[in-house]
Image (cartoon, rainbow, N blue to C red):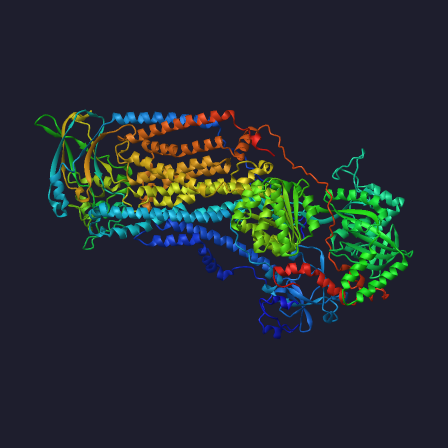
Amino acid sequence: MKRTPQDCPSRLPENTAVKQQQLPACRLQLSATGILSGFFATGVFCLGMGVILILSAKSSTEIEINYTKICASCAKLRENARNFDKECTCSIPFHLTQTMRGNVYMYYKLYGFYQNLHGYLLSRSNSQLLGTDVKDVETCAPFSKSHDGTPIAPCGAIANSLFNDTIILSYKLNSSVHIQVPMLRSGITWWTDKYVKFRNPSSSNLSSAFAGTTKPPSWPKPVYELDENDPGNNGFLNDDFIVWMRTAAFPTFKKLYRRLSRTQHFIEGLPAGNYSFNVSYNFPVTRFQGEKSVVLSTLTWSGGHSLFLGLAYTVTGAMTWLAAFSMMAVHLKLKGKRFSPDDKVKL
Amino acid sequence: MFCSEKKLLEVERKVKANDREYNEKFQYADNRIHTSKYNILTFLPINLFEQFQRVANAYFLFLLILQLIPEISSLTWFTTIVPLVLVITMTAVKDATDDCFRHKSDNQVNNRQSEVLIDGKLQNEKWMNVKVGDIIKLENNQFVAADLLLLSSSEPHGLCYIETAELDGETNLKVRHALAVTSELGADISRLAKFDGPDTKLMQNSGKTKFKRTSIDRLMNTLVLWIFGFLVCLGIILAIGNSIWEKQVGDQFRSFLFWKEGEKNSVFSGFLTFWSYIIILNTVVPISLYVSVEVIRLGHSYFINWDRKMYYSGKATPAEARTTTLNEELGQIEYVFSDKTGTLTQNIMTFKKCSINGRIYGEVQDDLGQKTDITKKKEPVDFSVNSQAERTFQFFDHNLMEAIKLGDPKVHEFLRLLALCHTVMSEENSAGQLIYQVQSPDEGALVTAARNFGFTFKSRTPETITIEELGTLVTYQLLAFLDFNNIRKRMSVIVRNPKGQIKLYSKGADTILFEKLHPSNEDLLTLTSDHLSEFAGEGLRTLAIAYRDLDDKYFKEWHKMLEDANTATDERDERIAGLYEEIERDLMLLGATAVEDKLQEGVIETVTSLSLANIKIWVLTGDKQETAINIGYACNMLTDDMNDVFIIAGNTAAEVREELRKAKENLFGQNRSFSNGRVVFEKKQQLELASVVEETITGDYALVINGHSLAHALESDVKNDLLELACMCKTVVCCRVTPLQKAQVVELVKKYRNAVTLAIGDGANDVSMIKCAHIGVGISGQEGLQAVLASDYSFAQFRYLQRLLLVHGRWSYFRMCKFLCYFFYKNFAFTLVHFWFGFFCGFSAQTVYDQWFITLFNIVYTSLPVLAMGIFDQDVNDQNSMDYPQLYQPGQLNLLFNKRKFLICMAHGIYTSLALFFIPYGAFYNAAGEDGQHLADYQSFAVTMATSLVIVVSVQIALDTSYWTVVNHVFIWGSIATYFSILFTMHSNGIFAIFPNQFPFVGNARHSLTQKCIWLVILLTTVASVMPVVAFRFLKVDLFPTLSDQLRQRQKAQKKARPLHSRRPQTRRSSSRRSGYAFAHQEGYGELITSGKNMRAKNLPPTSGLEKTLYNSTSWIENLCKKTTDTVSSFSQDKTVKL
């Protein structure tokens, strides 16, 4: 049992940096000057960024036209779900005082629509939308199967509540001639959504591909007939459908609907003048006290027209400067009468 | 006697020796030692059962079950089960390895061989198969693994010597004797197994191993409860919100969305939402918290094991952290309870100096006649001419040797006395070397010194003592042996030398002996007295030496009276004592001896440094008051600068109370009298006041309290007085305390002072105290293993305590606190965004982040940087930690992590979560992507938030980490890189194609993280959440710098040109005069010698009859028994059986 040092030299712990806690390291000890200059630099950056953002936001234009109340009669009609097959259109004239230059994007905007409800978000079937198994409706409750047990395609609450207004923008060229502003529906979806996430089931034609499924209960038409004009824009690959399926984070949101095709009169953008929206009013927002509007907007280098970031940066920058100045004041005031470490460390 | 002590458990035991069949009827326990918990079959169920008894695990299991209910499941099941399985597996593996070690050590003990008498033959049997009632033959130096009854032994009179190192750490031999009836039976030692296995004294004494938890643990539990309450509040708020929302908006909206199936009672919906949010918000206290804490502690324990500066090369013993869960408590110690022998001292006595006839020998002088330290190189006296010399003995003063050679009669007489007046037994080993069996190491030192100087004690019989005086054998007739006892504090022998002169040789405490001197000694007395003061000032243990010449006639008369007294029936002891007094007078002083009770290395420095760190050191020792005080002075715990040293030595409760009261009066009287009035309040108030009063006490005080007094003082009504007094004293020494009392004292401080305690000791008598204290430290590398086995930390030298506490403990505490602060901050920031989001998603318990992110955040994305900080961080380096013991104080005051700190962390987390949520919210409100596309979708929002969160907490940990090693760099940058790579992997096309339902975020990272706007949001979030913290910390360091801040600044400044100045505390030594009598001696050995019972039969000379009549044959053993009861009872008080 007795051990002599010679017997067990291995009991001596190894002399490595890790084991002796002597790892070479740099100690993070920020000096006052370092911190203060960091603060000033950050302040400058934030203020600058804020100003730039505000200026660029100002340079873009945005028009929002809330048509919930304007199309009151249609709204009334839609409040009763039984009238779903009755057509209702309304026209909303407006005047554009300034030309909107550059690319103009048309959005629809919904207020009070909770696309972020837990149950709502889950009520979709990605594998169905991927086209691998059209009948996979497992996760789609409560819209997985129709009353007779046929699987719904596309299934789920998100698809069922698809925004189905049609909005056409027309330009009053002169007092009598209205021309429809040319709009593109392409390029409004994410590339990955259009080419990876959503695929139609493979089959010679779409209607046979969706054989054995039924349309969502709120939809007037099955998924393969969403766009009668463009056969390539049907099924799960319908752009509006894809945009809708990318659910919004907050109850107020706008989604890209169309973008201006810059041809003819509209090469520069949207010229000033009188316009009108012709809306086929299908989406019953008043049933849940929501609102909807159309938004026309140009973009800046950083995206949409939003003052918030610019303001936030400006405020942060200002606060940082304020903090930096007060810290400097405190530091300089104390510098004279600070204890040297030795005064306090008496041994 | 033996059986009666078992009373509590069973009234009596019936055992027939060597009759297994009969004994089996009683179903006594077998002798298998069983400390392991599991076997292969029971491991899984028992271990799982145990694990789920822990609150945390049960809580997570509960959450898991909640998540399996589809109605309220807001997170998928894998978010909880992945970490839970991980944790449970890790713990199970650890438990299994621990148990393996226990199995191994059990087997080792169980399989030791013993010789058992079975069917009339001696057979080899494993100890585990020994049964109650077996007769066992033991040989010299064998282990004993059961409680045995001694039947007979090969030694005369059925004596046997046992070593109890594994029980009490004492290495000296103890005498046990067989009953007279049985001792006649056999020649070899044979014993009867009495209590087996779990019934043995050892197992019964071991006490229950309490599961120790640190105060941080307890605080953490409280905080977890707080957090849980907080979660419930949040849950209730959100549930109410949900009810209202359902009523006002949700009803219509839901019915619009979901048609009929959406219809729900709003209150019921609120109820479900409550549970859903409980699930979501549980990530504030994730399982990874508990795992990380354990990992960090394990890391710290390994650092202790690996520390070369705590490795004792002398015994090849590294320090060992035996418990891996207490490390940060090492940084909070306020009281250290230390054993003396073996811990502070080496239990080695060395003869250092002596004063003979007014001249000091042993002092080393340099050429100028100045005293110098012995440590300077100096030739020791060469004893090689003396064949009998003990080689380990060293003496540096050559003058003594010369005096002997010159034949100075006083010197000769002095050494002769040392060789004659003692209770040592001699024996020759196989090599012909003399071996002394000493009963007190002091005596051993003296006899050995005499031996080296040429007066060798050779052998003794009951009537003679043979010594070799400078080469010639001289036999003295031992006429009387005036034994030592506590009152006499001296021992004497009366011998007749070959010339026929009768001499009385006496040694004893100076105070006592000086009163017995002949008046003619006056001059010598003052001189010697000065010398004694000098010796005592150096912390040496002193004895005065004197002799008396007796004339034949006087002795004969006296001897006759002694015989009478011995045969007397009444007042025998008093009469004998009177006779002893009578003859021990008119002594001629010879001089004094000074024996050093060698301190362990570095004890003084350690003690000084620890007291600078405001750690109070209490010495709890079984030794005598004088010895204990002496050691107190020797290691600077007691100094002459102290205003007062209170000694409490009363024998009754009233006396003790009075003494305590006086001491307190004294204490307050010397300060201001008003405090006197203040402390007469109620007891509870007193305790609170104590800390206030403590501040007002100026000056140093010390308290010395005796074991007997302690027993009274620990009674409930005096307890508080004692505690109050003790806590105001700088040093407390408790002497003559039993193991149980040691534990009681620790318990007292633990309970009423609410302080963190540490007990350090080396023997089995310290086990109870080690187990009782918050942290038990065992001195390893010694014979007895009991203390180490019971301890939480062990190392070989007391001085390592300094490094353990000031470096490892401080760092551990510092790191753990930083870790906890950061961890709570991080998880509040992480989780509370769900709360804010609740207000925008109709309180529908939708999470902000992707489920995968929630699963991985705590275990992959952010665990390693904070672990690295928790394991490697240092504010100041180890040298500074040792040099500035004041750095230890934040730990004692609990400054780095407490409820206030927690609230600050929580506020910090809440602020960050606000910034994290509302900046993206504002930015996303009316935003569009650079290509006009949808930007404010849920998935982009989730990715933005997750990315900002990971970046913000990484920047935060980067700011918190004050010691950037490679590991920190790798972990912090690696974590961010890991986050992005996992993000892109999970959002990639390939993985979506395989699991479309599990990874619906396809393309999201690519799309969102290429938008300038998103990066602007992330940047702003980071700036907004980090800048206020930096500003706050800057101001704090600038305005209220702590010592460690200052040191860090200085460390930085001096980094380049820095000669390490290691500060050595000055060792001041007092020179006051104390009664230095220190004789770790037991009474009764004198009788043992004169009766000859402990001597081999062959050595016994024909009895002269002179001594025979003095004692009847059994009295000595009764006396021995009676007189050892003091020490015996100390042990049996501890638990039941005493063998």
- For the view shown, which residue lies furthest in the right direction? B499
Q: Position of residue B865 (x, y in %)?
A: 46, 40
Q: Position of residue B657 (x, y in %)?
A: 62, 53
Q: Residue A235 occupies which quadrant of the picture?
A: top left
Q: Residue A178 occupies which quadrant of the picture?
A: top left
The answer to whether B688 appears left or right of A49 in the picture is: right
Q: Position of residue A223 (x, y in %)?
A: 19, 45
Q: Position of residue B617 (x, y in %)?
A: 61, 45
The answer to whether B913 appears left or right of B321 in the picture is: left
Q: Nearer the viewer, residue B496 or B841?
A: B496
Q: Is residue B1072 visible?
A: yes
Q: Is residue A56 above or below residue B727?
A: above
Q: Quadrant of the C terminus of chain A?
A: top right
- For the view shown, which residue lies furthest in the left direction? A176
The answer to whether B948 appears left or right of A149 in the picture is: right
Q: Nearer the viewer, residue B344 or B972?
A: B344
Q: Nearer the viewer, residue B249 or B853?
A: B249
Q: Quadrant of the N terminus of chain A?
A: bottom right
Total labels drawn? 0
Residue at horizontal 70 percent and vertical 40 percent from the top: B1069
Q: Is residue B868 visible?
A: no
Residue at horizontal 59 percent and vertical 50 percent from the top: B722
